[in-house]
Amino acid sequence: LGGAVAVGTTTAVVSADGEDTRKKTVAYLIDRQTIRVMDLVSGLTVAHIAHTTKVDWLELNLSATKLLFRDKHRCLVLVDVATNERTTLLNYCSYVQWVPESDVVVAQNRGDLCVWYSIDAPDRVAIVPIKGDVVQIERAAGRTEVIVDEGTNTVAYALDEALIEFGQALEAKNLERACALLDQIALTPETEAMWQTLASAALDSGSYAIAERACSALGDVATGNALAKINELAEKAREEHQRLYSNDLLDGYSNYKVRAQIAVLNRNFKQAELLLLEQGKTEEAMTMWQELQRFDNVIAVAEAKGVADVETRKQAYLQWLLQTKQEEKAGEMKERDHRFQEAIELYLQGGLPARAAHVVNTCGINPPDQLLEAIASALVKAGMFEKAGDFFEKLGKNERAIEAYKTGRAFRRAVELSRRVCPGYVASLEDAWGDHLVAHKQVDAAINHYIEGRQYPKAVEAAMSSRQWTKAIQIVDSLDQEEQATKKFYKLIAAHFEENRQFTEAEKYYVKAGLRQSVVEMYTRNGLFDMALKAARLYMSEPEISALYVSQAQQLEAAGKFKEAERLYLAVSEPDLAIHMFKKARQFDNMIRLVTVYRKELLLQTHQSLAQQLLREGALKQAEYHFVQAKEWKAAVEMYREADMWEEAIRCAKLHGGIAASKEVVYRWASHLGGELGAKLLQRFDLTEQAIEYALQTGHFEHAVELATTSMKSKLPYVYLKRAMWLEDEDRFQEAEEAFVKANKPKEAIDMYIHQHDWVNAMRVADTYDPESVTDILIAQARVSFENKDYATAEQFLLRANKPEMLFKIYKESRMWADAQRVAREHCPNRLPE
């Protein structure tokens, strides 16, 4: 902690016996936020400074009269050790130091160098813009410089040495040197503060010539003229004394006239008067007071010294007082002269009826009744009712005194007087007193006054307002129990006990108020339903209980207190109302709970109804729950399907209907998407075979081939076969042939060409892929030739196919006997007998 201890000493002062009498002072931290300044010589604490933030630096000035400290927030504070007065110099300070051997302060506030040449005027600060950080202060050879580190180089900022030396001269009490230094410097805000400091120091030390010069520099003409007069008188007194006593040197300032003027300058007028009167200068003393327009002091001096024209002076002063509307002082003069009636008249004329009444009451005079009435009227007019009442009372005018006391709210005196002279008026005064106390928020004090005034309702209200419930109950119990006002008070008392949860007491006073139903309502409001039911059965009939409970439940329902409302509905066997309440409040769980207990036969129907309602409102998740509870999970699936939420539909079907149901939804989704998207969907759900089948059904053969190739090669011939058959139907025979071949079904390709009578391609495919089918081709060609009556060509094809028996049979069936015999004879002799 930098600067945790700071030491200061005054300038060396050596006593007559050679002892060093300098004051030695230390400032140190008791803790991080508290500073103690101690006199090391006497061991006494000079100052105790508590700060709100941790202090991180402190230092006393050379004379230990000023303390600087800085807290952790970089706030710089100046403390006057003698008065403990604090002044915040800077809200942010990164560097601070007293200039060595002076009372000049140098501090840095970000980009500004701040210099206080006169620390007694902390608002007068010289500010110099700088770049960089202050490093140190160097003082040598009559020159003081502040060293600033600008990063790449250091710069020295010179301080005004004359201003620094002024502080040193002032500290050394060398006022002449200080004045000479200031004379060399132009007047600035900083030097103006220094001139002010010099003037104060000169006046304190009696250096009036220097004080005159300082006041002249400051432009203080009045003080300067007064000091010039003092200096002039002192010079004349010195010269006069030297003329009379050539060998005796006298300081002119010890002359009585000079001392009197100094006393006047210091506004110590009594001392000035005493100095002049001691020298027998009565006229000069009176002149001084007259110049100050203190004419009463003039007369006092004149009377004390027995001046001949004192009466003339008094008359003149009196006339001046009256002309300047100073009737009070004029009255005081008359009072001192025991001319009391004139004094009273002057007091009344000056609007001071209290002073006039005081004269009457204390001086033992008996003025005319007209004057007394004037005093009383003036007191009332001035609003001084208590004094007017006191005045009337002393005059024996008791009724007017009581009225004045009442108007002035001096009720105690009014009541005391009324008890003595007019007892019948006491009650109304006590009532008014109570009203006054209530109006001034002293409600508890008003209770007894209302009781004294027999205003019991007001007393009860005051007791309740001041929370004095025991007293309120005592008063109400003493009233007529049949009065409506009494019942109203009982109701308020009951409400108080209810508010404080003293329900037994509250019940007692609700009953006294005739509000038996309110007892039940109280217990209901506070959730004490068993007590409410007990009270209801005690004070009410069954229909009344039912009506009340339903009404209370509806109020609780409106207030959102559904649990409490449910208890009331069920207490009077109205579960349907509770169910309807929860439905309106959309608390479906509670609704289902009650239906399960009280209307179980309607449970499925209720779930179905809620599901339909939630479906209409778009709350599909909740609707699903109720569809499932109603055993209608398919409706939930259909709901999601219609909302185009297929993923949810699949989840719901799988959860409640199993894998088969979820696949069915997938198929429906694929059908909805159509085309390749549908096939991809089936594949995503690991339904490859179904995906292939679906692709074939929708004519996406390339995708079917791709699926079979990548995921199920065993299905590839089947895919090609299906594609070939589709191509055949589309009369794209060449492509169909390729597909049939890839499906390992060349026979199908041959059959296709046979069907188209494309014998060349049929024969080509047979020769290439299925030689056994050549015979079939030839037979087919033969059949066509026979149909076309081209028997020779047909015979040729069948013989090529090595089917003579078929040829024989055909001729036979066609009754072409000659050809049949020929074929049998040439190719199948075994058939010749036929």
Image (cartoon, rainbow, N blue to C red):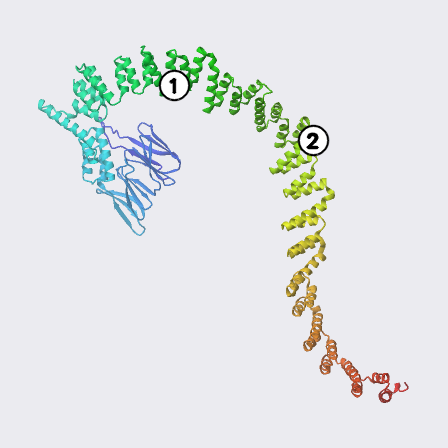
Separation of marks 1 and 2 at Cα, in angstroms: 66 Å
User: Which residue is nearer to you in this view: 386 or 747?
Assistant: 386
The residue to which callout 1 is attached is 385
**Disc on res. 180:** none
**SS for dot 2:** helix
**Left or right: 456 with respect to 350?**
right
Reply above or below: 628 against 2: below
User: Which residue is nearer to you in this view: 146 or 394?
Assistant: 394
**SS for dot 1:** helix
User: Which residue is nearer to you in this view: 538 or 653?
Assistant: 538
Task: Give the quarter of the image for residue 378.
Answer: top left
Q: Is residue 167 visible?
A: no
Q: Is residue 657 visible?
A: yes
Question: What crowding class fits label 1: few (fewer than 14 Cα within 10 Å), some (14-19), or many (20 or more)?
Answer: many
x%, y% of residue 473? 56, 21
Question: What crowding class fits label 2: few (fewer than 14 Cα within 10 Å), some (14-19), or many (20 or more)?
Answer: few
Mark 1–mark 2 CB contact (< 8 Å): no
Quadrant of the image containing the N terminus: top left
Residue drawn 33% across the image and 16% down it: 374
x%, y% of residue 606? 70, 45
Residue type, mark 1 in image = Phe
The residue to which callout 2 is attached is 543
**Left or right: 469 with respect to 304?**
right
Residue type, mark 2 in image = Pro
Task: Give the quarter of the image for residue 781.
Answer: bottom right
x%, y% of residue 154? 29, 49
